Image: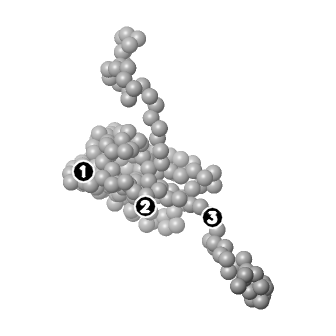
Amino acid sequence: MSGFWESDLGEVTGKAEDAFARMFTQIPDGTMALARIEAFINAEYQGNKYLSLDWIISEGAFKGQKVNQKLKVYGDPRANDPEKARHRALNMFKLLHQLFNIKPAHGNPPSDQELALFVGKQAGIKVRETEPNDNGRQYNWVSEVHEAKGFKPEVGVSVIVTHKSDHLETAFDRQKGVKNDEIEDDIPF
């Protein structure tokens, strides 16, 4: 960048769509969208290694929004069935290779340089929502990846949690211990 009014990201237009900050919203559960891979790297959180993909939605109501996909190809000790979780992650990684016609160069874990071959590739993704965490926050994640050709985008439905109880109180529950003749006495006819 040589001058003040030059940007590495492109022309400075002064147009509203280029100047205003976009409001990013939670993407509804089950949304199917075309997206491209913006980043694909080896990552680690609290000692657990995984592959991290950042997808950017390419068009539609959620254009420009980022959704993360974690492939726990190195294992997931927190999973209910760690072996099954790793097996599924390895299958998703192989599916990505097949989808984009990229052949692994060896049988070792991928380097970030090898994962960079996926950046810019486009596919259809299915976006899911997590249940609210202890702080009430929900997150989106990618559950499926499909070939872009012929893919049909569709907006899903937001997961709304209105209670945390396994049992909803009903009118019958509220009336436990009340005698039938007491209930009948309140009837005006």
The outermost residue toward the front is 189
Give the residue at x 66% y 73%. Answer: 169
Q: Is residue 47 left or right of residue 3?
A: right
The answer to whether mark 1 and mark 2 are in CB contact below 8 A is: no
Front disc: 2 or 3: 3
Q: Quadrant of the C terminus?
A: bottom right
Q: In whole angstroms, how far apart are the C-alphas of marks 1 and 2?
A: 26 Å
Sequence-wise first label, 1 or 2:
2
Sequence-wise first label, 3 or 1:
1
Q: Nearer the viewer, residue 152 or 122?
A: 152
Q: Is residue 113 left or right of residue 26?
A: left
Badge 1 marks a residue whose secondary structure is loop
Give the residue at x 33% y 54%. Answer: 154
Compared with 11, 103 (above or below) is below
Q: In whole angstroms, how far apart are the C-alphas of marks 3 and 1?
A: 38 Å
The answer to whether mark 3 and mark 1 are in CB contact below 8 A is: no
**Residue topped by disc 2:** 86
Front disc: 3 or 1: 3
Q: Where residue 128 appears, x then y in whole percent?
A: 43, 56
| Residue 108 visible in the snapshot | no
Sequence-wise first label, 2 or 3:
2
| Residue 38 visible in the snapshot | yes
**Residue topped by disc 1:** 148
The amino acid type of the residue labelled 3 equals: Lys
The outermost residue toward the bottom is 181
The amino acid type of the residue labelled 1 equals: Ala
**Residue topped by disc 3:** 164
Q: Residues within 10 Å of mark 1 (few under 14, many from 20)?
A: some
Q: In whole angstroms, how far apart are the C-alphas of marks 2 and 3?
A: 30 Å
Q: Nearer the viewer, residue 58 or 118?
A: 58
